[in-house]
Amino acid sequence: MSGRGRSYRYVGPVELKAAVRPGDGGRRIGSAADFGGWFVEQSAAELAEPFTFVVGMDGVLRLAPRRSEHVACAGEISLVREADRWVVSEVSNQSTGYCPDVTSWAEVARALDAVGLRRPSGFTHEVVFRRCPDCQEHNIVREDDFVCVFCGSDLPAAWNVDPTA
């Protein structure tokens, strides 16, 4: 997964990563034609739920059904039909496997624009992730409370989930 020139490595549970099988990476959607071809292959049940997505290092969107393995496609995106086109109604960086920073929106926006999907001006549900410098646990920061829920230590203001990034 990428964002603002940054690559996000998988930092979630190893047992989930081990469950990824070939083909779990979703469909590469680089154009409106790609989206149209992918869309007609989705079942009514899949279309009723959000999809998972990732933007690869090549800047191209990948989409997968929500019930697919989230290690390969990470954030969530909902689409609705408006008049004669599909529109992104909700999009989130929620991924406890990659914990992408909210700054990844710029890459998501570029990928959606390349496909021709109308989109909101930012994540409709932003998730702020931080790694605790003391206990090393991953945290979701809620209501700007930068305190580790596991040990009570202060969390840094800047994204720090992947220490090698």
Image (cartoon, grey):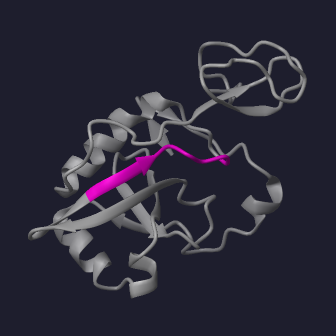
User: In the image, is residue 51 part of the stretch drawn in magenta?
Assistant: no
Q: Position of residue 55 (x, y in %)?
A: 42, 49
Residue 145 appears left or right of 77? right
Q: Residue 33's image quarter?
A: bottom left
Residue 61 x, y percent position in the rendering: 36, 55
Closer to the camera, 81 or 3? 81
- Quarter of image, res 29: bottom left
Q: Is residue 43 visible?
A: no
Residue at position x 27%, y 66% in the image: 80
- Please identify the residue farthest to the left as the structure is shown: 84
- Residue at 31% x, 55% y is 89
Location of residue 141 in the rendering, given as x and y in whole percent from the top left corner: 65, 28
Residue 94 counted in the magenta span:
yes
Query: The magenta stretch spans which residues?
Result: 88-97
Q: Nearer the viewer, residue 128 or 68?
A: 128
Can residue 92 be seen by looking at this rendering? yes
Say which residue appears at 39% left-offset and 39% top-offset: 123
